[in-house]
Amino acid sequence: MDENSGHLDPTNEITLDNVKKRAVSGVAVLTGRTLILNVISFVAQGLLWLFIEPGEFGVFLLVSATINFLSYFADIGLGAALIQKKEKPESSDYKTVFAVQEILVVTICLVVFAISPIISRTHSLSHQGLMLLYALNISFFLASLKNIPSIILERKLDFVKFVVPQVLENVIYNVTLVYFAWRGFGITSFTYAVLVRGVLGVIAMYVVQPWKPGFALSKSSLKSLLKFGIPYQINNLLATVKDDGMTIVVGGILGSYGLGILGTAQKLVQYPLRFFMDNVTKVTFPAFSRMQDDKADLERSLTRSIFFICALVFPSIIGLIVLFPVLIEVIPKYKKWEPAYIPIILLSANTLIAAATTQLTNLLNSTGKIKTTMKLMVMWTTLTWILVPMLSIKYGLNGASLAYALVSASSFVVFYIVKKALNWSIYGSVVTPLIASLCMGLGLFLLKGLINKSSLLVFFVLIIFGSVIYASSLYLLEGKKLIEDVKKIITPFVKK
């Protein structure tokens, strides 16, 4: 094959130089294009919070968590194993993974339909809630059909095509959801939105990455992929038990209203991660896998990728903490979400720590140290299941938020583990954006105190003022390195 295409031979799909170029380009393209997506989602969610009540949002979170929890039993990590695999997968590898996953997915879907009356009784679901459960179950099946085309695109690091179905899905989902919520459909708005998204998402994925579904059961292929896949999926299962499983439990303790407030706080503090971190980890997982034999490249890539995430996430979270009371005052209909403020402050610790540690665990997974991350997940899951129910029962909504913050503090152990293996710079990746963000937060707090009245104009002036302080502080700390990083991000767009 032509070397310019990034391919060498049947066992090497892409050269190391092209991995580096496509990794940088992939981060830039994903961040730029999905930034637009997330802005649409953010605006839609903002409108949705105007039209629905905390209790309705709590029902959606509860039903979604139930489906998410069950869905992880339908994957044994084979998809991630295909992405992580050094050699180019054979056709039998793809068909074997597809066959195994679809058998598991269909089984789970049938189980959900069978036990839906029990779920409805135990969770006190209305008829609307039950219909939402069915819709999410169908959507889960439709999503499984996209797995192989997605894996093919990820292995090629072809993230330009990868975002097309995501754009369509998110736009259609949010437009449908907000429209029906505005028309007063309540929980049923989610039902219509997830069904429309599921159908159009499958069509879009097969258009951008054609793949003829096929079934195979290659014993040698399955054995090879399961070596990585099972430990990887155990980690995912532990994460699901820790997150979605705990959502189900907390919903039983706090009720749908309390869960709706807690879920809103979690969603707000996680927006920066969804905006920025997810794009980077999506690219760096296959990129780190290809670089795993080059320690120097890994150290540099890890340091700058964490810096990129923290430089965007840290100021977003500090800004949210300072400006949330202003937003509540400016938009009276948001007053019903005011109880989420203390949980937002407490849960912000999760996001600040996750901005750095998620990329570290991503590195461990991509370089084959899956057993290490499995031990970490056992620790986090155990702490979550001990602290969250206990503090939720004792202190309610704020107790649950405090428990999640305490669990996240244990993540600092990942810094130590990775630092022993790679000499990455904690100061250059985490400390400098944190200092700049704190300077911004202090400036915003002081200016907010000087302004007596609140309005949308004041709110946006504060955002602009904070952005200027942050950018200036970061430049003083980083200097030329910051300019070089910005050039690397802009270059792929200029060339296109």
Image (cartoon, rainbow, N blue to C red):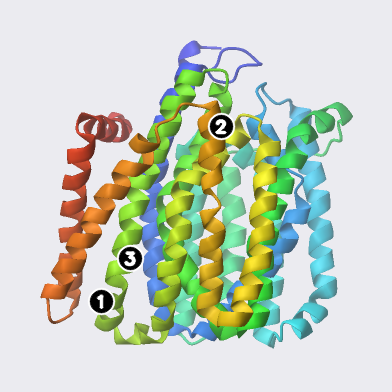
**Residue at horizontal 59%, vertical 73%?**
61
Considering depth in this image, is 390 or 105 the residue closer to the camera? 390
How many residues crowd around disc 3 within 10 Å: few (fewer than 14), some, or many (20 or more)? many
* Quadrant in which the C terminus is drawn: top left
Q: Which badge, 2 or 3, is on the more N-terminal residue?
A: 2
- Tag 2: Cα neighbours inside 10 Å, few (<14), some, or many (≥20)? many
Q: Which mark is residue 326?
A: 1
Percent across and percent down for residue 443 are 17, 61
x and y percentages locating residue 272 in the rendered image: 40, 56
Q: Label 1: how many residues lie within 10 Å, few (<14), some (14-19) or many (20+)?
A: some
Report the amino acid beneath label 3.
Leu
Q: Position of residue 465 (x, y in %)?
A: 15, 60
Q: Is residue 255 above or below residue 300?
A: below
User: Where's the N terminus, which quadrant?
Assistant: top right
* Left or right: 155 in relation to 456: right
Element at badge 3? Answer: helix
Amino acid carrying label 2: it is Pro
Q: Nearer the viewer, residue 188 or 461?
A: 461
In front of the other: label 2 or label 1?
A: 1
Residue 320 is marked as: 3
Q: Residue at x 29, y 62 (%)?
A: 319
Please indicate whether residue 275 sits to the left or right of residue 124 in the image.
left
Q: At label 1, which amino acid type do we have?
A: Val
